[in-house]
């Protein structure tokens, strides 16, 4: 049963000695809180907020946690408005529950933005009900009562714990209007809150996808074909004779080796041989040809057009042109892809494992097996990173299809080689920029063509400085390949941000302008007289730029070569200054200053982690990451050839946040796009060599 | 083939293919899943355990090579999750996704056994064989330092107690 927006159903239920209040935090408009039907009748416990008589508060966190800290940040907001002591809060991961939650996914850095109001309302509503319950008990006016750390305090020194008030509070009508705390009274929001799973992580307890064990479960690995190839035949005769091997089956050009233990499956797999058709499968040379063709074609899609670019370029005093290029790269979360599926004879399906989009997994598997979605249950495990890779449920589909064939519960495990060689990459792209400058060095014409391979629109046509430039033309070309792609942390902008910010550095240099002042001048223009549609707020841009320049001591550090970049993505603003130094004749990034405007910082500790992590991610991939293709096969496929950045290769990072109290926006991704640009510009300042390709050749 | 070894102070006897990497024996045969698979070629350090007290990559180490050895995994590092490294990791809020952290912690604890007061360079060098895709490196390095301070305080306390 679903609670409707207008009518609330309230319920208290005894669950292991605790009274539970269910609040529908996630109703579509976020404006109303109502008691929600818990599904405890069916043995599942989905209340969002439960308080037991000892005052212990249990909050369910619905969104998948991939290391971005949402499992901690969401409850922080509820606990703040509920006015409880953080140490009394226990957080649990909720499974997929489409009745009671919406947007139960991780992607696009959008969770806090989406749920901020709902979370506050859930906490504030409960708090108000406890006050009313206490006021009723003490026979005093509710307005004379206050709360503190899980207690209601009365006018004559009365004190009652929320726990002791649950029975009465839960019978009260749900208030429709609540007031929120003032920012200055925040006890938890904005402070450092440690990850709720820390203690479990440091003792090795969390159950990640690969750690899932279910009764009767078998383990499988899958051999996948080269991109574009068709499986002709396979020979598994030897494998089938090996100890622990249960079956070897084929579906959709894949061969699955099924056995009782990981090592037995690995050993058997090594003896399986597969034959594929031959064809003109992707190689690096294919991709280069597509880039060249895409740059020449007159059939590009116009994504944005302001003024008349060609005419403005023709009358420019100076033209700057540059081409930037990035390869396909793998997400490579530390936990390789895996998933558990049990397609049962009674027509129900249990899925379990790491996915950023559990509801899509449910839908996709239901569609694959041609069954009702309601028959598919999804349990969320802890996840060893995601970075966008777990937005694609190919692993869940493989597990479900295999389970339906072998009629057993199965955990499909990808080796690192499977994970890195198995597709869903950040698309490869080439960008060509042209800028026309007038006699004073001002940019009067700006052109960008992005050619991506399975990238869709490889540009983000409304990106600053668009809006400040009179004549703009942004075009995209998409080339279609058998190599599979998908969102990678800060999709498209993870490289486009670098290319744009590095190109603007060239524009500043050609125009004889300071990169910081040039941007500030443009933003002043946007404020007074914008060109076309504007998707960003110039004042917020200006603030992060000014703060970054100030905190980094911009261009005022003898012996230090600095590079600047600033980027707006996922509704947040990040300005960066990278410092490079010459060490033993080589340029090295030694420090990064980052100023972020993500609105209200919910958890300072988690926020710093996201900024520093994204910058390290950005540096590592700019310096090292590259997949090559030969005849449909990607290489390298493990960390010996595909380098991830290590602890002795990182600069120091100072992460600052603009304190403006605006409602929170994205944080998992926004610090990544400007990183390649700030470091490329710093390296240029040090070496006078522009870096046009990822990975850099420093 | 039956192989005897001690894991987290418990004597075990396993009937297992002697080529099975220790990692898979721990995970599949002993249900000790705190030790992680990351690469299978000793490149990332997620599978780090102690073999006779030495931090070792378990993903490439055949179980036959550790017959009669003494193995410590993350589950056995301390009885109550209060090893100085574990305390420091929580205190400085190191983990993001958490997947690599068991390997990081086993490496750090081993480093501190050998060098109770490591320099910044010793910490960076000692920890840089373990990959963290989330990029928690700064806090890892700070936490190793903090753990060494926690451990030295503990030591001082117990010395004081003894002498008192």
Image (cartoon, coloured by chain):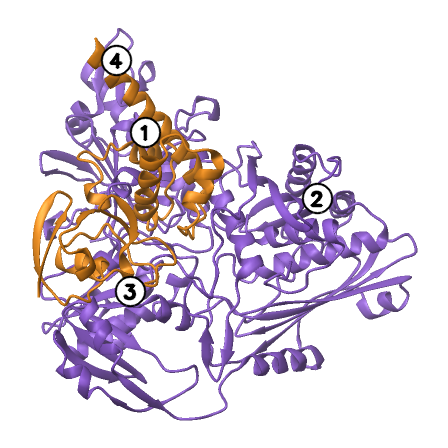
Chain colours: A purple, B orange
Between disc 1 and disc 2, the foreground one is: 2
**Are the residues under marks 4 and 1 on the same chain?**
no
CA–CA distance in space, label 4 to label 1: 45 Å
Closer to us: A514 or A599: A514
Rendered image: mark on residue A82: 1
> Is the residue marked by circle 2 packed among few (<14), some (14-19), or many (20+) residues within 10 Å?
many
Q: Of circles 4 and 3, which is in front? A: 4
Query: Is A527 left, or right, of B48 in this rendering?
Result: right
Q: Compare marks 3 and 2 and give the one earlier in the sequence.
A: 3
Q: Secondary structure at mark 1?
A: helix
Asked if marks 3 and 2 touch (Cβ < 8 Å), the reply is no
Relative image position of residue A81 (x, y in whole percent) = 36, 30
Q: Nearer the viewer, mark 2 or mark 4?
A: 4
Pointers 2 and 4 in contact (C-beta within 8 Å): no
Residue position for label 4: B160
Q: Which residue is mark 2?
A: A562
Q: State the image coordinates of residue B119 (x, y, percent, origin top left).
A: 46, 33
C-alpha separation, residue under disc 1 versus residue under disc 2: 46 Å
Callout 2 secondary element: strand
- At x 20%, y 26%, the residue is A55
């Amino acid at each position: 049963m679903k609670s409707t927006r207008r009518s609330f159903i309230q319920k208290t239920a005894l669950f292991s000695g605790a009274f539970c209040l269910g609040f529908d935090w996630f109703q579509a408009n976020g404006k109303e809180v109502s008691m929600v039907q818990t599904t405890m009748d069916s043995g599942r416990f989905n209340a969002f907020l439960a308080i037991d008589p000892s005052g212990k508060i249990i909050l369910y966190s619905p969104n998948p946690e991939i290391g971005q800290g949402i499992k901690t940040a969401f409850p922080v907001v509820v606990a703040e408005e509920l006015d409880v002591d953080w140490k009394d809060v226990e957080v649990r991961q909720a499974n997929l529950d489409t009745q009671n939650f919406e947007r139960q996914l991780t992607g696009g850095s959008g969770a806090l933005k989406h749920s901020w109001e709902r979370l506050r309302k859930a906490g504030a509503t409960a708090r108000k009900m406890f006050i009313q319950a206490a006021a009723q008990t003490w026979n005093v006016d509710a307005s004379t009562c206050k709360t503190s750390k899980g207690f209601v305090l009365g006018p004559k020194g009365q004190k009652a714990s929320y726990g002791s008030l649950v029975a009465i509070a839960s019978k009260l009508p749900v208030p429709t209007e609540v007031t929120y705390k003032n920012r200055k009274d925040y006890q938890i929001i904005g402070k450092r809150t440690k990850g709720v799973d820390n203690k479990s992580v440091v003792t090795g307890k969390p159950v990640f996808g690969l750690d899932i064990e279910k009764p009767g479960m078998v383990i499988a690995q899958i051999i996948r074909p080269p991109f574009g190839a068709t499986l002709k035949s396979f020979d598994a005769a030897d494998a089938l004779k090996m100890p622990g091997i249960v079956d070897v089956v084929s579906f959709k050009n894949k061969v699955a080796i099924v056995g009782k233990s990981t090592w037995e499956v690995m050993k058997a797999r090594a003896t399986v041989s597969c034959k594929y058709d031959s064809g003109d499968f992707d190689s690096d040379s294919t991709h280069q040809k597509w880039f060249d063709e895409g740059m020449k074609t007159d059939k590009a899609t116009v994504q944005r057009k302001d003024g008349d670019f060609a005419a403005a370029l023709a009358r420019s005093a100076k033209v700057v042109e540059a081409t930037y290029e990035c390869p396909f790269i793998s997400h490579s979360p530390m936990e390789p892809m895996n998933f558990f599926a049990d397609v049962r004879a009674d027509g129900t399906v249990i899925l379990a494992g790491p996915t950023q989009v559990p509801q899509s997994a449910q839908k996709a598997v239901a569609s694959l097996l041609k069954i009702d979605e309601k028959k598919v249950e999804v349990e969320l495990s802890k996840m060893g990173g995601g970075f966008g890779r777990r937005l694609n449920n190919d692993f869940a589909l493989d597990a479900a299809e295999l389970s339906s064939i072998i009629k057993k519960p199965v955990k499909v495990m990808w080796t690192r080689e499977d994970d890195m060689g198995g597709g869903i990459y950040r698309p490869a792209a080439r960008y060509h920029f042209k800028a026309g400058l007038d006699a004073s060095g001002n940019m009067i014409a700006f052109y960008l063509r992005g050619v991506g391979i399975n990238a869709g629109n490889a540009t983000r046509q409304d990106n600053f400085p668009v809006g400040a430039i009179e004549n703009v033309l942004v075009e995209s070309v998409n080339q279609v390949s058998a190599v599979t792609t998908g969102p990678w942390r800060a999709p498209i902008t993870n490289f486009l941000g670098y290319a744009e910010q590095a190109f603007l550095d060239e524009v500043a240099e050609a125009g004889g302008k300071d990169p910081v002042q040039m941007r500030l001048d443009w933003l002043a223009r946007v404020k007074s007289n914008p060109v076309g549609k504007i998707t960003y707020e110039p004042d917020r841009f200006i603030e992060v730029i000014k703060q970054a320049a100030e905190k980094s001591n911009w261009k005022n550090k003898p012996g230090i070569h600095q590079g600047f970049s600033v980027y707006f993505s996922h509704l947040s603003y990040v300005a960066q200054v990278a410092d490079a130094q010459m060490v033993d004749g080589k340029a090295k990034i030694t420090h990064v200053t980052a100023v972020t405007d993500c609105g209200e910082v919910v958890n300072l500790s988690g926020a710093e982690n996201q900024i520093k992590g994204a910058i390290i991610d950005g540096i590592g991939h700019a310096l090292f990451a590259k997949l090559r293709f030969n005849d449909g096969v990607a290489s390298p496929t493990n960390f010996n050839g595909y380098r991830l950045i290590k602890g002795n290769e990182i600069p120091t990072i100072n992460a600052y946040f603009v304190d403006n109290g605006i409602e929170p926006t994205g944080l998992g991704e926004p610090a990544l796009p400007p990183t390649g640009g700030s470091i490329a510009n710093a390296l240029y300042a040090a070496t006078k060599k522009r870096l046009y390709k990822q990975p850099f050749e420093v | 083939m039956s192989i005897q070894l001690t894991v987290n102070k418990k004597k075990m006897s396993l009937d297992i293919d002697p080529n099975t990497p220790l990692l898979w024996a721990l995970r599949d045969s002993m249900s000790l899943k705190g030790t992680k698979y990351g690469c299978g070629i000793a490149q990332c350090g997620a599978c780090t355990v102690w073999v006779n007290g030495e931090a070792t990559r378990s993903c490439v180490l055949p179980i036959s090579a550790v017959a009669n050895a003494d193995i410590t995994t993350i589950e056995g590092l301390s009885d109550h999750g209060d090893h100085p490294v574990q305390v420091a990791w929580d205190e400085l809020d190191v983990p993001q996704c958490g997947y690599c952290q068991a390997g990081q912690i086993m490496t750090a604890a081993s480093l501190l056994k050998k060098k109770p007061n490591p320099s910044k360079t010793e910490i960076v060098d000692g920890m840089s064989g373990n990959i963290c895709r989330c990029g928690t490196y700064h806090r890892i390095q700070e936490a190793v330092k903090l753990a060494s301070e926690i451990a030295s305080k503990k030591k001082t306390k117990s010395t004081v107690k003894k002498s008192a």
